[in-house]
Amino acid sequence: MSDAETPTALEKKGQIRPRLARALELIVHKGLSITKAAEDAGLRRESLQVALRKPHVQARLADVKRAWMESETFVAWGTVVELARGAASEDVRLKAARTILESSGELARENRGDRPQSIQGVQIVITSTPPPAPTVSPQNGVFEAAPYLPGGSGHD
């Protein structure tokens, strides 16, 4: 192996060695542990662990994850379409169709009649001050208190 092909030289350029790229794919696509991915890719576990801490390897791992998620999205949509068209359960077909309609925005347009939807609200603000203390009236032991007036003392 020449100096230009050594892992150190490749890493300085931000490139990923083929075995490391394979290990990253195994981790993402197959869900393998670091130990198993390193073994299957022909790397030492410690080497893979060190590599996974490097920014350019983390960036590549993120790219592999993103690409995998995009491909799985197509698979998931295929499953939803298959269910909408041919599931034995009417409930499953309805839910799959609803998923498609919601994702396309059709249900939202239908619900608002293709007009901008306004949201109305009510705000209630309650300011409370305690009423004045009740007083005892000499008339038959009846308790009386001054009327409670918001913003006033009630003792005019």
Image (tube, helix red, strand yellow):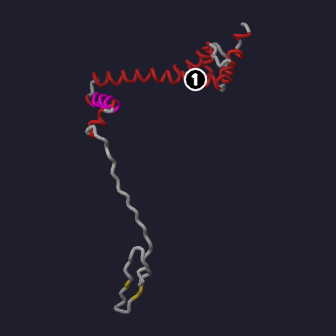
Q: Residue at x 49, y 21 (%)?
A: 68
Amino acid type, label 1: Leu
* Above/below status of 137 relative to 55: below
Task: In the displayed orientation, state which residue is furthest to the top.
Answer: 1
Horizontal side of 76 relative to 111 (left or right) equals: right
Q: Residues within 10 Å of mark 1 (few under 14, many from 20)?
A: some
Q: Residue at x 34, y 25 (%)?
A: 80
Q: Which residue is mark 1?
A: 61
Chief secondary structure of the magenta span?
A: helix
Task: In the displayed orientation, state which residue is furthest to the bottom.
Answer: 138
Residue 107 appears in which quarter of the rendering? Answer: top left
Horizontal side of 119 relative to 127 (left or right) equals: left
Quadrant of the drawing holding the N terminus: top right
Mark 1 lies on a secondary structure that is helix
114 in the magenta segment: no
Task: In the displayed orientation, state which residue is furthest to the right.
Answer: 3
Q: Magenta stretch: give its range.
A: 91-103
Q: Residue at x 71, y 15 (%)?
A: 9
* Above/below status of 122 relative to 10: below
* Above/below status of 53 relative to 140: above
Q: Residue at x 38, y 89 (%)?
A: 137
Q: Nearer the viewer, residue 85 or 64?
A: 64
Horizontal side of 139 relative to 30 (left or right) equals: left
Residue 149 at x, y percent in the picture: 38, 76
Residue 96 at x, y percent in the picture: 31, 28
Residue 130 appears in which quarter of the rendering? Answer: bottom left
Residue 12 at x, y percent in the picture: 70, 19
Quadrant of the drawing holding the C terminus: bottom left
Q: Nearer the viewer, residue 155 or 134?
A: 155
Residue 23 at x, y percent in the picture: 59, 17
